[in-house]
Amino acid sequence: MPRILAALLTCALSAALATGAAFGLVTALSATPEQPNVPLVTFPDPSGDRSAPAPSTPSADR
């Protein structure tokens, strides 16, 4: 009987520890500020005064 009681207490303690760790992780992740969404690469506006280059035709020497 004492072994069953020890096993039940160990199981309950490990479940409580896992639940606490999960809640702590979620709290830590939601506490970090969101990063600004700034693009690393920007392209010029295609509606500017310069026209887009004409598409090239494939060569027939294949």
Image: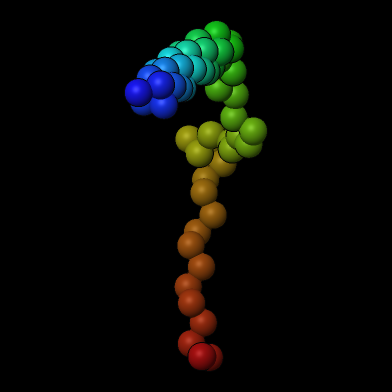
Q: What is the residue that sits farthest to the bottom in this orientation?
A: 61
Q: Is residue 38 positioned above or below 60 on the image?
A: above
Quarter of the image holding residue 41? top right
**Where the N terminus falls, by quadrant?**
top left
Residue at (50% x, 39% y) in the render? 46
Give the mark count.
0
Query: Is residue 5 or residue 14 the one in the foreground?
Result: 5
Residue 36 appears at what percent x and percent y?
58, 17
**Horizontal side of residue 39 vs 19, given as left or right:** right
Quarter of the image holding residue 32? top right
Q: What is the residue that sits farthest to the right in this orientation?
A: 40
Residue at (55% x, 8% y) in the render? 31
Residue 56 appears at what percent x and percent y?
51, 68
Examine the rendering and report whether any part of residue 11 can be seen.
Answer: no
Q: Is residue 13 positioned above or below 42 on the image?
A: above
Query: Is residue 1 or residue 16 the one in the foreground?
Result: 1
Query: Is residue 41 or residue 11 the one in the foreground?
Result: 11
Residue at (56% x, 13% y) in the render? 28
Residue 7 appears at what percent x and percent y?
41, 26
Residue at (53% x, 91% y) in the render? 61
